[in-house]
Amino acid sequence: MTSAPSRVTCQYGDVNHSFPCGDLSLDFVGTLKARRNDAPHETFTTPSSVSSWFDESGLVDSPVSFDDLRDAVELREAVYSVVTSARLHEPLEPDALALVNRAALAAPVQVQLDAGSRRASATASQALSSVARDAIDIVGGPHAALLRECARPECTQVYVDHSRAGRREWCAMETCGNRMKAAAYRARKRAEGE
Ligand SMILES: [Zn+2]
């Protein structure tokens, strides 16, 4: 992790990130999609893709350097390791745990109320600290027992099942849920035709 403020600033690209989970650190993990595919889909390809994620997540509008991009990917994979171990009730991998804890040592995003609106400022490492702290709150708290992986096998998105009934199957109904229901419908129709 770099602790000094970033000096390389990047303009936002035309990246549009999705936030199906509603939990900061788990949506952050979801920036690498289709993890079990031969070629997972990486959305953190440039510093501007990370700065746009920070901005679109509502966290902060922060400049991101190439060093920050590397730190973001390293933290993301460490968070994925920790939440996956927690979800599977397995011991946490020590290197991943150490990386998440190290990231959380930095000050988080500084927020102020400015005439009724939220004003946030942070370096990239502070933004990553906020992400790491969110992961710690999830894995170290009661939500750890509610960690799930999306039931669409290719998706691999991890989320906390906040639903009252505790039966949420998909990272998001609008995407994976509808795709799986459409596939099930087609399979049923095929079976009826045979
Ligand atoms: Zn999904």
Image: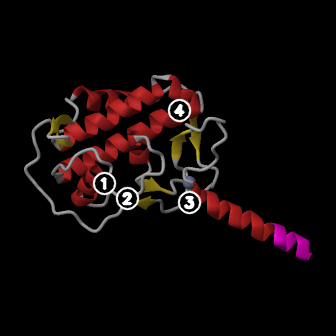
Q: Tell me the residue that label 2 is attached to.
A: 17
Residues under labels 2 and 3: Cα distance? Answer: 15 Å
Q: Is residue 192 magenta?
A: yes
Q: Tell me the residue that label 1 is attached to.
A: 56
Question: What is the crowding at mark 1: few (fewer than 14 residues within 10 Å), some, or many (at least 20)?
Answer: some
Residues under labels 4 and 2: Cα distance? Answer: 25 Å
Residues under labels 1 and 2: Cα distance? Answer: 7 Å
Mark 2 or mark 3, which is nearer to you?
Answer: 3
Q: Earlier in the sequence, mark 3 or mark 4?
A: 4
In the image, the segment drawn in magenta is: 188-194
Q: Earlier in the sequence, mark 4 or mark 2?
A: 2
Looking at the picture, how far across and down is residue 154, in whole percent?
Answer: 59, 58
Q: Residue at x 21, y 29 (%)?
A: 106
Pointer 3 and pointer 4: residues touching (CB < 8 Å)? Answer: no
Looking at the picture, how far across and down is residue 18, in whole percent?
Answer: 42, 57
Image quarter for ligand 1: bottom right
Q: Residue at x 56, y 61 (%)?
A: 175
Residue 112, picture quadrant: top left
- Report if the beta carbon of the residue with label 4 is closer than 8 angstroms to ligand 1: no
Q: Tell me the residue that label 4 is attached to.
A: 85
Q: Residue at x 26, y 57 (%)?
A: 52
> In what element is the residue under mark 1?
helix
Pointer 1 and pointer 2: residues touching (CB < 8 Å)? Answer: yes
In the rendered structure, find residue 174 and report the number of the disc placed on it: 3
